Amino acid sequence: MQSGTRTIRNGTLVFALALAVWTAGCAARAPLAGPVMKPLALAESIEARPAVLERNHFTRDRAGSISEADLRKVLAAPVFLEERARVGIVQVADRYDPDADLPLVDIPARLCAELEDSAVFEVATEISTDWPADRGISGLRELAARYRTEYLLLYRHRFEERSYVNSWGWTWLTVVGIFAAPYQTLEAAGVMEATLFDVKTGTILFTVFERVHGQADENAYHHERKMRALKEKLLAEAADSLGREVVSKLSFLVAARPDAAQPERRAAQAGQDQAELARSEIGSVDVISP
């Protein structure tokens, strides 16, 4: 009797396991149902959209030479190039102090010629830094006042240089190679910068960078002179490209000039529109004969 009961239990267990395996197989063969996505609440999301950030909430950023109110006035003012203005080109040194060295570099002269050819300014002139003036921005504004120029195009260039022994270094093993072989590579990388400074407002309208790089294999003599010649070559080759970039930026500022006659034209156009509307209304009235 007990053996029969045990047999029934075992059979029931085997049947339950078989049923579970069959159910799992059917579930595996069944295709997966796609996820059901909740409709987007567009109206709610638009209403709950946060406001555009327009103010600086970092108190540490507000300490400086310009107040919060003046900062907003400067940023809200239109940016354009005044008509019949004069511009001076001046070479500056570190931190935009007027460069007191001899003006041996001819880049300011080439920029001046480029500006004259563009006819953007009434007069373009190079500025001599020998006139007595303060250092820094105040000195630049004083020079601009002496030349009666509303704008200053500030030019400067900076270089990083290095030298190293190249593959010709094996010639050290020979007596002739030590003196004649070009085993020393001179490398120079620099940045040419032109910045348009609005003298009256003290703001900067744009800055253009022209990056240069070059190298030369030389012998062991006169490294300083050869490095200087390499830099002068790089400056001369990139001067025209810098001038074109400056004129391109100026064209955008010229196009942004406010049209003085625009309000009058708008009023005249509005009057014409109203007159045409009145004529059209009169023409559409049906005349009834008695």
Image (spheres, rainbow, N blue to C red):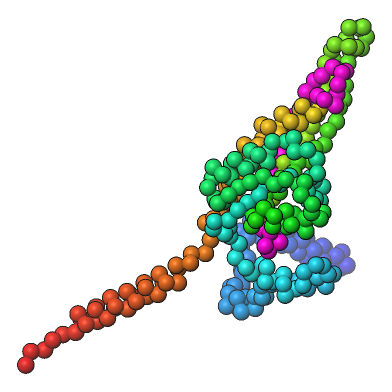
Quadrant of the image occupied by residue 236 = top right
Question: Is residue 23 covered in magenta?
Answer: no
Q: Residue at x 67, y 44 (%)?
A: 126
Residue furthest out toward the top: 175
Quadrant of the image occupied by residue 182 = top right
Tell me the quarter of the image containing the N terminus.
bottom right
Position in image of residue 110 (x %, y %):
63, 38
Q: Residue at x 81, y 24 (%)?
A: 226
Tell me the quarter of the image containing the C terminus.
bottom left
Question: Is residue 218 covered in magenta?
Answer: yes
Residue furthest out toward the left: 290
Above or below, comparing residue 192 to residue 269 in the picture: above
Q: Residue at x 74, y 35 (%)?
A: 104
Quadrant of the image occupied by residue 197 = bottom right
Foreground residue among 103 and 10: 103
Position in image of residue 272 (x %, y %):
32, 74
Foreground residue among 110 and 208: 110
Foreground residue among 133 and 90: 133
Residue 281 vs residue 58: left or right?
Answer: left
Is residue 74 visible in this depiction of the protein?
A: yes
Q: Which residues are magenta?
A: 198-226
Residue 32 vs residue 93: left or right?
Answer: left
Q: Residue at x 89, y 11 (%)?
A: 179
Above or below, comparing residue 29 to residue 227 in the picture: below
Is residue 208 visible in this depiction of the protein?
A: no
